[in-house]
Image: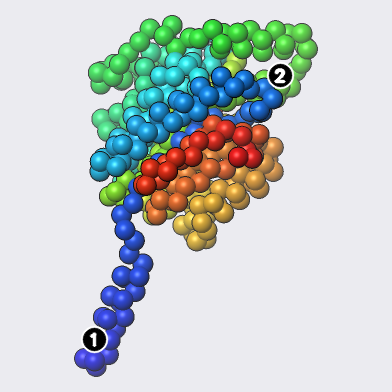
Amino acid sequence: MKNTLYLLLLLTLGCQTKTETKPTFGIVIHGGAGTILKENMTAEKEAAYRQVLSEAIQVGYEILKEGGSSQDAVEKTIHVMENSPLFNAGKGAVLTADATIELDASFMDGATLDAGAISGVRTVKHPISAAIKVMEASPHVMLSGAGADSFAKEQDLEIVEPEYFFTERRINSLKRVQEANAQKKLSLSEIDKAFLQQQRYGTVGCVALDLSGNLAAGTSTGGMTNKKWNRIGDAPIIGAGTYANNATCAISATGWGEFFIRSVVAHDISALMEYKGMSIEAAAKEVIHNKVAKLGGDGGVVGIDRHGNPMMEMNTAGMYRAHMDAEGNLAVKIYREE
Ligand code: ASP
């Protein structure tokens, strides 16, 4: 009996050493998915996108390399993209039908399954930080509108005038969309389709695995051009646009929000991994190309699993995206076939 127990102990130890992996880390980001075609791009524009994506991911990479947390890496990386007018998040966000700006963001901590989100804020310079504050300093998961703005102010987050977010480019695209809709005299649902397909990209997101094995995910967006009625997309919805769980993966999504909410995209990828044992890549392919696409939606996701395997999947022509592994290898991509 004693011998059998000893043998069992040896076998267990042997198995453990085999499955133990060296601590590693990694980071993946996106800057929105959509009809991003090379023929519509100038060399300068392309270089500018690649530049900001590289700068942003480098910030998170350095934090992770020094042993910092995935939460810190996600927050600081997203700040760089929220500061850039190129992306539909923070400065440079798209305009609503009333020519205002309403920002959404969410964050999830894979270690504790704690989460925070804000929607429709108008004065918070870094919506991702407000989402994190909701998680850390309130008993709630999601705050919206003027209340979310006041909460951010009470928490001493940086507050700006709404004008700070406006850019010439987004003012012009709202004008173009509204003029086109007026000329075509389309029904409301047709208008939505037309503008949604052309005018929706630039949401930002980041997922990271740190050296302690903790995963985190964050997403930040201005939503969709010409949105009405305080419309809220998937980005601030935990499980749809953002999800993280140390048992599986961290996910941030970008795409046609209504379809991503209905498909519960981010959590679905995690659930396929948890309950079906699928790899992050297979799970993302299933959700993006089967589930979302079959409903008629489009977009993409980035993710990282608990071993550091990156994933970047889309059913659109392109998605601004980048990945950096623990060795510092950097991949920055825009078009689907890259
Ligand atoms: N998912 C965002 C939304 O529906 C938009 C996007 O990611 O492009 O608000």
Q: Hey, what amino acid is under mark 2?
A: Ile
Residue 43 vs residue 58, the one in the foreground: 43
| Quadrant location of the C terminus in the rendered image | top right
Q: In this view, does 14 lie above or below 168?
A: below
Residue 203 vs residue 123, the one in the foreground: 203
Q: Is residue 178 shown left or right of residue 329?
A: right
Q: Is mark 2 on a helix, strand or loop?
A: helix
Residue under pointer 1: 6
Q: Can residue 244 be seen in this view?
A: no
Q: Where is residue 120 in the image (x, y as percent from the top left)?
A: 45, 20
Q: Position of residue 330 (x, y in %)?
A: 44, 40
Residue under pointer 2: 191
Q: Which residue is drawn at 40% across and 54% down?
A: 307
Q: Hey, what amino acid is under mark 1?
A: Tyr
Spatial distance from mark 2 to mark 1, Cα to Cα? 71 Å
Displayed quadrant of residue 19: bottom left
Q: Position of residue 314 (x, y in %)?
A: 60, 40
Q: Which residue is drawn at 75% across and 18% down?
A: 187
